[in-house]
Amino acid sequence: MTHIKIETYETDYYQWTIEQTQALRELVNTHQELKKLEALDWENIIEEIEALGRSDYQAVVSLLTRILQHRLKIDYAKKPECNHHWQAEIKAFSNTLKRRYSPSMKPKLETEWQGIYSDAVDLYLIDYPPSDIPLVCPYLLADLLP
């Protein structure tokens, strides 16, 4: 493994899964003799690597949704006695986000940001009645990312 691949693996796991999936597909499609290595299930190996990246991405979306939900509680639920608990929840979600987030996720997160916010609003509305919550996300993605 080259130094660049090791670095990508360590600094941007999500991007690494995308690159490895593409490289394996290209390799198998251009070198048909590799398909004869019956001990390896190439198609499922490729799909599993791809699934690892999707799983990390979905975890990041879930964590951001929960952070937004709790920010909404602090800003709109008008329950100051709960703010300390909600801040602790945000901190816990943010700590996990630091471990799961990869920089190459940012462009996709930016395109889905309003939908992520809408999901957070839906979760907020389960516990609290509708209030003056903005339709457009009042929080910046960049402020929540590590």
Image (tube, rainbow, N blue to C red):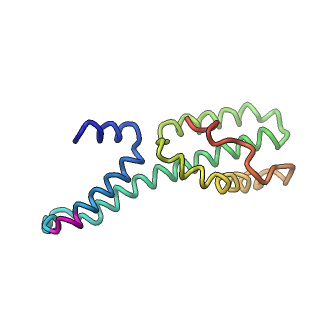
- Of 54 and 123, which appears nearest the observer? 54
**Residue drawn 54% across the image and 39% down it:** 97
Q: Is residue 90 above or below residue 22?
A: above
Q: Is residue 125 above or below residue 68?
A: below
**Magenta region includes residue 100:** no
The span shown in magenta is 28-32
Query: Is 63 left or right of 78, judged from the image as shown?
Result: left
Which of the 4 quarters of the picture holds residue 130? Answer: bottom right
Q: As drawn, which residue projects farthest toward the top? A: 84
Q: Image quadrant for the N terminus? A: top left
Q: Image quadrant for the C terminus? A: top right
**Residue drawn 69% across the image and 51% down it:** 117
Query: Is 14 left or right of 109, judged from the image as shown?
Result: left
Q: Is residue 90 above or below residue 116?
A: above
In the rendered picture of this protein, how many numbered marks are placed on residues?
0
**Residue drawn 42% across the image and 47% down it:** 14
